[in-house]
Image (cartoon, grey):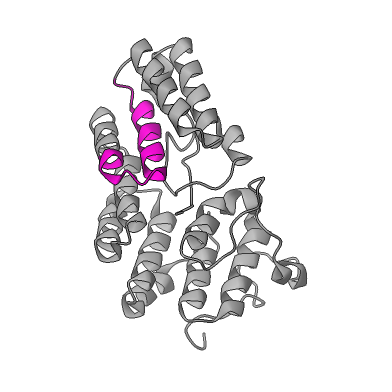
Amino acid sequence: MNRSLCRALVFAAVFAAAAPVPMIHAAQETGLTQAAKDAGEAYVRALLTAGALYAQRDFTKALDKLDVADQIHPDVPDTWYLRGAIYAEQHNFDKAKEAFEKAAKLNPGDFWPQYNLAELLLMQKKYGPAAEAFKGLEVFAGHQELIQFKIVFAELLLGNPDAAKPVLDAMKIPCDTPAYYFAHASWGFAHKDEKEGNDWTAAGLKIFGPGRCLAFYDSLVAVGWLPMRNADGSIPEHPQLLSLPAVSQGLDTLPKVGGPP
């Protein structure tokens, strides 16, 4: 099963304890859309219940609850974000694509439906089209680190390190997200250097904490580069993490990638 990020909802606390899910974003990054808030308390309650059922991987009941949400207030993008995430989990990629396209129409200019459509290509192992789709997202401000990680990741999976390397080199440190560390971890794993991959993973976990790393960690889980999360959704302990000093961004203790600095 492809396991990665579920987009953080206002009920992110529910998801935080959940098992890993596809790196599909199910609603607004920082909470509900304004449309969802305007739909009223009954709608939000139905959406939250659907999100909790999704976190429990009870997809049938989650979809039923989304039907209830639609009856309360139709055409709210949050409903379609979550539908798309569920369909992606079920590998019903055609329905997932339709759901995200619907969300995009209901919330024009939003980054996340376009991101989800690119992620669907990645989940289907269409690495070339996925890389191009992620490159098309570079026009969206505020998501550069995530986009760079996804381009590096897709190009490496495509077996195209020459295309991945310039993007990797362009990533900056200090950084706002774990993307830098997990992009470098991906480079290590793709080049059969498990120690390098694990060291970068451990550094990212130590600097940002497991909660902020779940999105990136699960992407690497999906392709077999890292072990799956524990049954309670936590990240397995990395031996390398115990051996690293108390790192801060930019320390020379971090592994080098692609030759001498």
- Residue 231 drawn at (x, y percent): 65, 48
Residue visible at 52% across and 68% down in the picture:
225
Q: Which residues are magenta?
A: 75-97
How many numbered badges does the structure rendering display? 0
Q: Is residue 128 magenta?
A: no
Residue 178 seen in the current view:
no
Q: Is residue 161 above or below residue 143?
A: below
Residue visible at 52% across and 85% down in the picture:
261
Residue 17 seen in the current view:
yes
Residue visible at 25% across and 43% down in the picture:
94
Quadrant in the rendering for residue 169? bottom left
Q: Is residue 257 above or below residue 13?
A: below
198, 71: nearer the viewer:
71
Tell me which secondary structure the magenta stretch mostly adopts: helix
Q: In the visual, does 83 lie left or right of 209? A: left
Residue visible at 48% across and 52% down in the picture:
3
Q: Residue furthest bottom?
A: 260
